[in-house]
Amino acid sequence: MQDKLETLRQMRAKARLGGGQKRIDDQHAKGKLTARERLDALLDTGSFQELGRLATHNISDFDMGSKKYPGDGVVTGFGKINGRRVAIYAQDFTVLGGSFSQVQAQKICKIMELAQESGIPVIGLLDSGGARIQEGVRSLAAYGELFVRNVMASGVVPQISVQMGPCAGGSVYSPALTDFVIMVRKTSFMFITGPDVIKAVTGEDVDFSTLGGTVTHNTLSGVAHFAADDEQAAFRIVKEILSYLPQNNSEDPPRVTPYDDPARRDEILDHLVPDDSSVPYDMRQVISSVFDRGSFLEVHAHYARNALVGFARLDGYPVGIVANQPLYLAGVLDIDSADKISRFVRFCDAFNLPILTFVDCPGYLPGVAQEHGGIIRHGAKIIYAYCEATAPKISIVVRKAMGGAYIAMSSKQMRTDLAFAWPTAEIAVMGSEGAVNILYRQELTRAEDPEAVRQQRLDEYTDKFYNPYSAADMGQIDEVIEPSYTRLRLINALEILRTKVASNPAKKHGLMPV
Ligand code: HXC
């Protein structure tokens, strides 16, 4: 018996070393932790239960016989984060560059299936050169197995991917199917084909970082949602995200013990919106004043900054926030912000997070590039996402709600439960200059003093529409509220909506204009 125990201990010790001490040292030299060190850093101490530690590949071609490592380049199992269960896998770059094999797929798919059935979030720590080249089509098929699990778990349990190394080929598509992608500055890269292949095919010269580094994917492509300064910071982001989310789509999001007075009034809000409606202000100020202090976690903070999305708490309850940001491009809706908003709205809806929308938007961005880029198709996603969402929805028109933006940004007609407006709201089909030019073109052409007539018509238009009252008069706004009371009004409104039940017609699935 003792011999058998000793054999097991030796095998487990060998597995702990992954690809061996030399490669572990190389990993550390690159500023990266090993797979097991990462699990220790992220999970509650002593909570990890490993599965598949001794699995190895069974491939004999391409001289793979000498390259057998227990675990086959991925550590998989279940653990806890702040006392809540998670399914987790960490790819081990010290074993064949963390390359994705048939056995890796079996191990990861196993925990994903258990997680989906038991309603447990899935976290992937990725550090992989993509499909294991020596396994040929087996590793490609293995990706297919993984993608199916990602898609089946989508909207059932939250899925978070942390890119912790040079993730290439197939190891970018699984993260792309998950809900949130976190990248680590300097050490994390994502690309389908690397610089050498690009050079050969298109002749373009590009380095790893420009092609698929953390800044590129957080600012330009929108593939990544968070940029972490180092691995520890990435783990803090994982913990923060999870703190707002239910374990699965049949649970309510977790409330924390409230720590901020529900009746707190920040009077700065009563003076925040400038009288001149072309002058910007920071929508983040609205968010930080209204929601529980310090509770805002911005998602996609560096991408499409004319929109703001993220999680926060109201009286301890998690919510999703969508807002226009007048500081960037006057808060217009464009292709990228449409993608950002619609994706976030759908995520919140899938996991029962109330969606609170703060509107200050002059409309969709005019321009040939936007039209040719498909602003019609992309912009329609926002409409689709809000119309489809059955989670509690509240909108607050802070300032401009012009034309398509008024309707798209959670208007009452699109199944928004409660629509509020500040007295500074301007709700109109279009801005005054454009409207007067169209409506009074002939009068302006004939006028002796066109400037005086234009000014008079502008004043009339502004008086009529640059306020929330005609919308309130028609019942399109439920209540015009004093800005500094927004926090209390939203807390009370959410209390009403907490038990909301709504559904959509039975169908196989809708056809979102992707
Ligand atoms: C097998 C691999 C591997 C792979 C790396 N290795 N990638 N082994 N299959 N895909 C091995 C290396 O041979 C090396 O082994 C070890 O991992 C470390 O790799 P290095 O190159 O020394 O590390 P580094 O310099 O840090 O470069 C990392 C890298 C590079 C950028 C990821 O290895 C690379 O470009 N790999 C190939 C990336 C790629 O093109 N993948 C696409 C595969 S096709 P030794 O024994 O020397 O330590 C694909 C399609 C799927 O994924 C599509 C699904 C939809």
Image (cartoon, grey):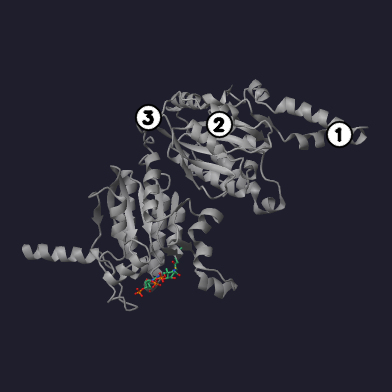
- In the rendered image, residue 258, in percent from the top left (x then y), is placed at 37, 29
Q: Quadrant of the N terminus?
A: bottom left
Local secondary structure at mark 1: helix
Residue in the picture at 45% in, 28% down: 500
Q: CA distance from mark 1 to mark 3?
A: 56 Å
Q: Which residue is mark 3?
A: 258
Give the quarter of the image for residue 412: top right
Determine the residue positioned at 23% across, 65% down: 15
The kind of residue on which mark 1 rests is Glu
Residue lying at the far top of the rendered structure: 473
Can you give x and y, in whole percent of width and height, for residue 409 in the image? 59, 36
Of 290 and 443, the residue lying toward us: 290
Q: Position of residue 231 (x, y in %)?
A: 38, 56
Check disc 3 and report its element: helix, strand or loop.
Answer: loop
Marks 1 and 3, the one that precedes in the sequence: 3
Q: Is residue 283 left or right of residue 224?
A: right
Spatial CA distance of label 1 from label 2 is: 37 Å
Tell me if label 1 and label 2 are in contact, CB under 8 Å.
Answer: no
Residue sitting at the far bottom: 63
Q: Nearer the viewer, mark 3 or mark 2?
A: 3
How packed is label 3: few (under 14 Cα within 10 Å), some, or many (20 or more)? few
Residue 315 is labelled as none
Left or right of 175? Residue 412 is right
Spot occupied by residue 92 in the image (x, y as percentages of width and height) = 33, 63
Residue under the image location 66 percent in, 40 percent down:
363
Contact, CB < 8 Å: mark 1 with mark 3?
Answer: no
User: What residue did someone put label 1 on?
Assistant: 451
Residue 17, relative to residue 506: is it above or below? Answer: below
Mark 3 beta carbon near ligand 1 (under 8 Å): no
